[in-house]
Amino acid sequence: MILREFISALATVSTIGLYLTGIPICRKIVAKGSTQDTSFFPLIVMFCNTTLWVKYALIKDDPTLLYANSVGSVLTFIYVSIYYLYTTHKTHVHRNLAFGAFLLFPILIYVKFYADNLDDAVLYLGFVCSSVGVMGYGAPLSAMSEVLRTKSTECMAFPLSLANFIVAIEWFSYGFLLRDFYIQVPNLIGIFLGGLQLALFWKYPSKKQTTASAVL
């Protein structure tokens, strides 16, 4: 019981800290008055992911999941709104917003009005949450392919990769203690993908770091 409470608190604080990393990105967008090369898709996936987990937490009566993802949902909604205000590629953003709407609303409507019982709702929503969670962890794959092409990790942020890896371990541990398969699966995949990212930093260090080491 004490271990579960400790992991619960740790996962909540770490997750909120991870969501707060969007603040400097948004400040940069506001300061420059443009979204430039910042990708919108990860933001909409993050919003869908946190919103679905909020619904899952409400059904399962899980305050840890509810608090962490409620904060995440509010923050990502703010990030999405700021991005929309400053982007010049409205058509692209509209397509991503449509994707988010088509992902969220049918699922929430089904769970609310058409699921036969609570167990069916948990089964269906848990599967969807796991799938979207895997999608979120898979977002850095494009950056990983770029690293393999250039043999440099300049396009990746080590602190963010490390934070994702640690948070995935914490949530997997939480799901394991609760024996919740739907929490375990996406975070186990997140641990694997996070480990791959960290391995890339060891295998292909940033060229800037390599140059600095050579100078020293």
Image: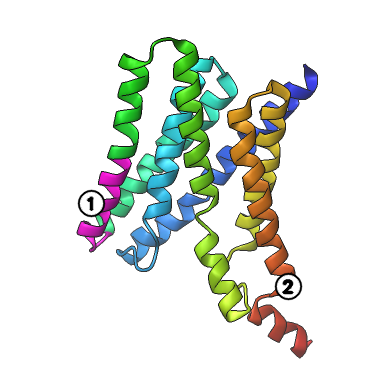
Spatial distance from mark 1 to mark 2, Cα to Cα? 38 Å
Q: Which residues are magenta?
A: 87-101
Name the spot of residue 127 as percent of width and height, x first. 50, 31
Q: Which quadrant of the structure image shows residue 172?
A: top right
Query: Does the magenta-highlighted stretch encompass residue 126?
Result: no
Question: Which mark is on residue 29?
Answer: none
Q: Which quadrant of the structure image shows residue 90?
A: bottom left
**Most common SS among magenta residues:** helix
Q: Is residue 171 above or below residue 25?
A: above
The residue identified by callout 1 is: 94
Q: Is residue 29 above or below residue 50?
A: below
**Residue 18 can be seen, yes or no:** yes
Q: Nearer the viewer, residue 216 or 15?
A: 15
| Total residue callouts | 2
Q: Nearer the viewer, residue 170 or 83?
A: 170
Q: Residue furthest bottom?
A: 215
* Mark 1 or mark 2: whose residue is earlier in sequence: 1
Q: Nearer the viewer, residue 215 or 120?
A: 120
Tell me if 170 is positioned left or right of 110 in this view: right
Query: Does the magenta-highlighted stretch encompass residue 88?
Result: yes
The residue identified by callout 2 is: 203
Secondary structure under tag 1 reads helix
Kind of residue at disc 1: His
Q: Residue at x 63, y 24 (%)?
A: 180
User: Label 2: how many residues lie within 10 Å, few (<14), some (14-19) or many (20+)?
Assistant: few
Name the spot of residue 196 as percent of width and height, x first. 68, 59
Name the spot of residue 47 as percent of width and height, x first. 41, 40
Q: Residue furthest top?
A: 117
Tell me if 78 is positioned left or right of 136 in this view: left
Secondary structure under tag 2 reads helix
Tell me if 214 is positioned left or right of 208 in this view: right
